Amino acid sequence: MNDFNSNNFAIQVIASGSFVDQPVYGGGRTYLVETATIRLNHVALKAWNDTIVHDYYQECFDTDGEFEAYVNEKKRLLLEFERNIAQAVGFTPDPDKEKINVTQVVSEVFAVAWIHEVKGVVS
């Protein structure tokens, strides 16, 4: 994204790549593994931070139901964050079948992986 230094959600793609995987245990299935190393701007980094569940916060809630609602909201924020990252990187997972994995490497640098089955690939 071009507005990395703005006050909008933005990332920089540092590196990206992909490979075809035909695992022995895959039953003849073929997968495309797409990866990217990205850097989050301050807005995206805050969005990621907002997804973190702090278990020690449980003491701050009067009921288990309130804490469960807190956890569910964090899960919703994480899904939204991952979808924003996928869109920014150019990955297009089917939200009903696939998801991407976004993992912090160090500081504002994250690794993104999307593994999805591809049809019609002959080895």
Image (cartoon, rainbow, N blue to C red):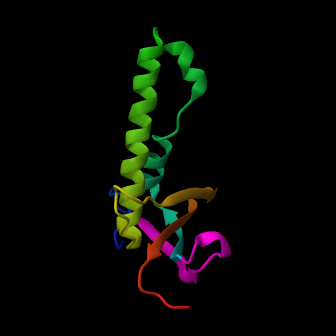
- The image position of residue 61, as x and y in percent, is 47, 13
Q: Residue furthest top?
A: 62
Q: Quadrant of residue 72?
A: top left
Front residue of 111/24: it is 24
- The image position of residue 34, as x and y in percent, is 51, 75
- The image position of residue 14, as x and y in percent, is 54, 76
- The image position of residue 38, as x and y in percent, is 52, 68
Residue drawn where x is 43% and y is 46% of the image: 78
Q: Residue furthest front?
A: 27
Q: Quadrant of the C terminus?
A: bottom right
Residue drawn where x is 43% and y is 36% of the image: 74
Q: Is residue 7 above or below residue 86?
A: above
Front residue of 114/21: it is 21
Front residue of 113/121: it is 121
Secondary structure mostly taken by the magenta-highlighted segment of the chain: strand
Q: Quadrant of the N terminus?
A: bottom left
Q: Residue furthest bottom?
A: 123
The verdict on residue 91 being magenta is no
Task: Classify residue 1 as left or right of residue 61.
Answer: left
The verdict on residue 26 being magenta is yes
Q: Which residues are magenta?
A: 11-28
Residue drawn where x is 37% and y is 73% of the image: 90
Residue drawn where x is 36% and y is 58% of the image: 84
Q: Is residue 45 above or below residue 61?
A: below
Q: Give the number of marks.
A: 0
